[in-house]
Image (spheres, helix red, strand yellow):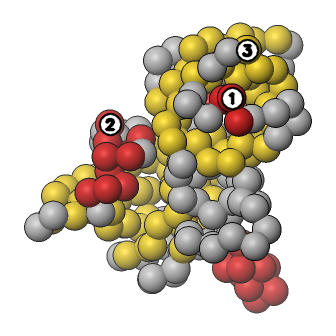
Amino acid sequence: MFTGIIEILGIVQKIERENDNLHISIKSDITSELKIDQSVAHNGICLTVVALENDIYTVTAIQETLDKTNLYALKIGDAMNLERAMKLGNRLDGHIVQGHVDQTATCIEKKSQNGSHIFTFKYDSNKNNITIEKGSITINGVSLTVVNSEKDSFSVAIIPYTIENTTFKGMQINDIVNLEFDVIGKYVARLMQ
């Protein structure tokens, strides 16, 4: 379980294909605190640490993960939002995040608005995922609140601190992002079917 509150950015150092798997090596200031078999959210994707060397650690994504996320577009030098699993007994500052990406979306608009930033995303509504006004959404692992909820799009308003300390700082129109819809909303939607 995660909270969607990003701890730090990591930088992709190496990407290696092995059959259908993708091994990703990341340089991070938290590497020394990690251990083999630990779960870490990478742009909202829960991946397991499989190797550690100095300040670089490696995770592996299988084909199922590659099919549902934006990892296919990853390049050496790219920044990734990182969050270690929450500790039981700590405050839940964001919302309940599983690290299981539901689908991707495309950034279709970004604008500044009196100190905050508004980003709008379009997603495939045929996958039966929904947003609700003022509900939670996780974008590239960042816990955010939905505004302007539509059938196949939504916006989020982001404070300057989040812009500066996540991959939103470099986000551009047409960038593909990972979405994890609110787990409670998913259960309610399923019950309503």
Q: Which callout, 1 or 3, points at the residue further toward the start of the chain?
A: 1
Q: Distance between the residues labelled 2 and 3?
A: 28 Å
Position of 171 compared to 106: left or right? left
Task: Name the amino acid, label 2.
Answer: Gly
Task: Name the amino acid, label 3.
Answer: Glu
User: Residue at horizontal 69%, vertical 70%?
Assistant: 90
In this rendering, does residue 112 appear at all? yes
Q: Mark 2 points at which residue?
A: 170
Q: The C terminus is located in which quarter?
A: bottom right
Q: Is residue 5 above or below residue 26?
A: below
Q: Percent position (x, y) of residue 138?
A: 56, 60
How many other residues sit within 10 Å of disc 2, few (<14), some (14-19) or many (≥20)?
few
Q: Which callout, 2 or 3, points at the residue further toward the start of the chain?
A: 3
Q: Mark 1 points at which residue?
A: 32
Q: Percent position (x, y) of residue 22?
A: 75, 21
Residue that lies at the very extreme toward the front in this rendered image: 32
Q: Mark 3 points at which residue?
A: 53
Q: In this view, does 137 lie above or below 14?
A: below
